[in-house]
Amino acid sequence: MNIKEFKLERYFAKHEFTAKYLLSSSDCDGFALKDILSYASKNEIKLWEDLKLGYTESEGSSLLRDSICKYYKNVTKENILVASPGELNFIAMNILLTPSDHVISVSPSYQSLYEIVKSIGCEISYWKPEPSNWYFDPEQLEKLIKKNTKLILINFPHNPTGSYLTIEELNKIVEIARRNNIYIFSDEMYHKLMISNSKELPPISDIYEKGISLWGTSKSFGLAGLRTGWIVSQDKKLLKSILAFKDYLSICNSATSEILTLIAVNNIEKFLNPNIEKIRRNILHFSEFVNKHNHFFEFIPPKAGSTAFVKLNITDTSLQFCNMLVEKTGIMALPSEMFEYKGKYIRIGFGRENFPKILNEFDCFLNTY
Ligand SMILES: Cc1ncc(COP(=O)(O)O)c(C=O)c1O
């Protein structure tokens, strides 16, 4: 297997634990263990205290999958598989695809979505948004379809632009895929982070028989440290193959993470609501900041999710700009080079409590830049 370096993750590895401020994280602040336990019912506390740290059920704890079921229509726990999101993505691509397949992926996007596809040897086409408003046009998607297109990769709420679809647009994509007998892998890691008046989309697995939904605890819940995700599909045969592949990787999930995920999934509003409030508040702060520096930034507020992709009107490259910023101020910002996206952009992450303080420091930097 030959796979290119994951640029964004390497950039984070370099700065995330040494930089003083994180301006570009896509996850919200992590909740404390004591907070999660304070939301637990008596039964859940008993599960936690009596937990034995042996191997766990390979497909994910039966109790946890029962709880996850309530966020999906017409599925039972047999339609759900729990593992880390990256692992599920990796396995699903390797099960679904062979080198002779063609795949369409949203772009820019989280690199693993398309890089694993490329490592398999598939031909890939990119479905790109209109940069003036980050609109992804389903008609453009349809034009990319070839005879051997096997899979469409989508990600809404979209990282990094904050773009979102209407239900009509999503239905159109499903209709295109169904007509051409194509799978849809829908990365829904930012599901339910509804920060504008956009209407929440259903998971793809609810509306399409060849749809695969991926969700997890990192973004919507602010629990990235649990490393827990799940995929949901009506295609049980596919899930069985993914489970068999997992035996060669993690085999099963962390017992402690599964119980904590169960508590989080059963108390979602305790996590989701503060995250949404924080993101909305920080978007307002950022809008004021951009107004002050309007010659410098072009900002399209996100419709959903926790991030925006902000254009920089500068002569340096965005990477040079970000390197200077972290060196002089300790603020880590993610340049568009990490998304292999042409043009000068940085991703802004709105899920951090210290966001206003970071903007103060950023303001000082810009005054002397
Ligand atoms: C679109 C998207 N998919 C998947 C992931 C991976 O999620 P996790 O960190 O939970 O593995 C991320 C993380 O940034 C993401 O932005």
Image (tube, rainbow, N blue to C red):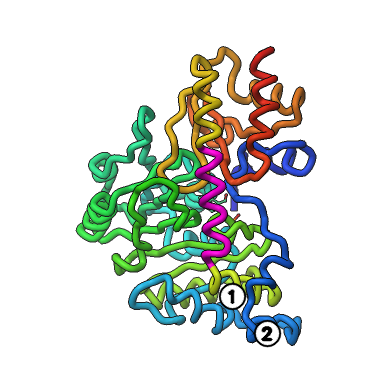
Give x and y (percent) for residue 115. 52, 47
Please indicate whether residue 197 sits to the left or right of residue 143 in the image.
right
Residue, disc 1: 262
Question: Can residue 124 be seen in the rendering of this structure?
Answer: no
Asked if marks 2 and 1 touch (Cβ < 8 Å), the reply is: yes
Question: Is residue 302 placed above or below 70 in the rendered structure?
Answer: above
Q: Secondary structure at mark 2?
A: helix
Quadrant (top left/top right/bottom left/bottom right) for the C terminus: top right
Residue, disc 2: 47
Q: Is residue 25 magenta?
A: no
User: Looking at numbered disc 2 in the image, what kind of residue is underneath it?
Assistant: Leu
Give x and y (percent) for residue 141. 29, 43
Residue range corresponding to the magenta coloring? 268-283
Query: How far apart are the two marked residues, 2 and 1, measured between alpha carbons?
Result: 10 Å
Which comes sooner in the sequence, label 2 or label 1?
A: 2
* Residue positioned 42% across, 63% down in the render: 213
